[in-house]
Image (cartoon, rainbow, N blue to C red):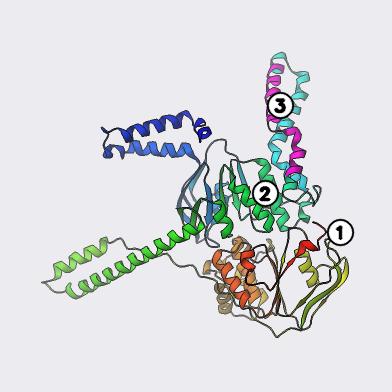
Amino acid sequence: MQARCCRMSYGMFYIAFFMIYIYTNPWITPQTRQNGTFERLGKAWDCEMSILNVENLSHGFGDRTIFTDVSFRLLKGEHIGLVGANGEGKSTFMNIITGKLMPDEGKVEWSKNVRVGYLDQHTALEKGMTVRDVLASAFDFLYEMERRMNEICDKMGDASEAELEAYMEELGTIQELLDHHDFYMIDAKVEEVARALGILEVGLETDVTDLSGGQRTKLLLGKLLLEKPDILLLDEPTNYLDENHIEWLKRYLQEYENAFILISHDIPFLNSVVNLIYHMNNAELNRYVGDYDKFQEVYAMKKSQLEAAYNKQQKEIADLKDFVARNKARVATRNMAMSRQKKLDKMDVIELASEKPKPVFHFQEARTSGRYIFTSKDLVIGYDEALSKPLDLSMERGQKVVLTGANGIGKTTLLKSILGLIAPLSGSVELGDYLEIGYFEQEMDQSVDTTCIEEIWNTFPSYTQYEVRSALAKCGLTTKHIESKVKVLSGGEQAKVRLCKLINRPTNILLLDEPTNHLDVDAKAELKRALQAYKGSILMVCHEPEFYDGLATDVWDCSEWSLRI
């Protein structure tokens, strides 16, 4: 606390002193305190303390409004959870405040010299870049200084005495900064962070396009840590992360001194790291003090109070309209009727926010499969090199198996090897009889240029337009989402489109690769219910114990046979 006080600017000191004076001086009346001057002082205080100011922000895509007149202020040390249903604009909001997207209206102001670290859910890593290159890019500003230093050294041979003196001074400043930031220990720092996040084993010279989803996420997290930003912006960082590294990230954020904004649908994780909730709903942004559970409690109370006030007002409006209708034609009661009509005209009518459609998942079931789903004999999975020991696995009808273990050990590769999408390095997989397989991939191809309607129609060409729209609506998508292109939807909405294709095809075995990624709380709960009700077999990769608890009949720890551990 003492250290923070020491960092207070002179401006903040004088504002604080003056505000204490005016609020403790008995000669200054409350009316005086509330005039424009003191209001402006309060705003000046907030501006001094804030890292980010967002004022009157509005944005939309076509006729689809994402948010309207949103104002937001981020203060030092705040740990914020940004929550809301899929498609409410959380990632869009992040893209606007980071400058990746220009808002339709409003302004975004960062305080001076603030370094921002942003972990995007759709960050693209270019082919040809190695793990070491990505981690070392955290120090690009230092490499830029080094290049400038080399330029100066080249110029010094032909410089005049005055120029030489200026060059020497600049060189000294740059050298000081390089030493301060441990420039000559970058390689050691890179290796240290890579080891802590479990990506050193993958190899620092590995091409980033060869990494799994979890390994890419860990790589980007490592880059952020090396940058040491003043504020962290994290968009669903737990997606693709295994349990151990989710726990590691949780501890890191709990001890993080600076501010961060976190988008996540992982409620236990949110509850453990945030102290404020900002809720995006119906194009609005509302602030709640406390964790997610506290927010839910307060939100439910506000919602019930609003509904009670709405019902009371609607009854009053109905009574007034009835009185006016019955009495406006009679001379004796016309004045009373007009008086009530004026009251109606002046009334500030309460409006209830439209309820978002909740998804309903129901997996269509095909005929019963044979006894065995698959059996493997001395199966070795991998690409260029082996990821596993020889595997003798078998799965029987009715089993609901969850694959767990660290990122990059071969869980997705195992699923693809069973399906025949990847040829095993050695050994064999034999599929059972009468299988109708449904496969949910971890990621969607971002180059897809179709609308949601076209995407479902391509899969089910016999469907009528009504059936296509009805199928998508049951998955929790609104009319505007349904008519939009898939690539402009949020990660959660894209997942619902893929689930729509899966649930409308009769299956007796489901292979699911992290199906909970990007899904909001309601969709995740409904998916768990639907999978519990499903009578077929399930083989699923999942890192959320609270999701598969009560669903899985067996849990296979893939680290027991992986060669990457």
Left or right: where does residue 264 sit relative to residue 200? left
The amino acid pointed to by label 1 is Glu
Which contiguous range is marked in magenta? 164-192
Q: Is residue 532 above or below residue 82?
A: below
Q: Tell me the quarter of the picture where residue 422 sits.
A: bottom right
Q: Which residue is mark 3?
A: 175
Helix, strand or loop at mark 1: loop
User: Is there any visible trace of residue 281 in the rendered image?
Assistant: no
Numbered disc in front, either 3 or 1: 1
The amino acid pointed to by label 2 is Leu
Label 2, label 1: how many angstroms apart (C-alpha)?
Answer: 26 Å
Label 2, label 3: how many angstroms apart (C-alpha)?
Answer: 28 Å
Q: Are marks 2 and 3 in contact (CB under 8 Å)?
A: no
Which mark is first along the chain, 1 or 2? 2
The image position of residue 242, as x and y in percent, is: 69, 58
Q: Tell me the quarter of the picture where residue 265 sits.
A: bottom right
- For disc 2, the neighbor class at 10 Å (few under 14, some 14 to 19, many from 20) is many
Task: Verify whether residue 91 appears in magenta.
Answer: no
Q: Residue 221, labelled with which disc?
A: 2
Q: Residue at x 65, y 58 (%)?
A: 239
Q: Residue 385, labelled with which disc?
A: 1
- Most extreme residue toward the bottom is 367
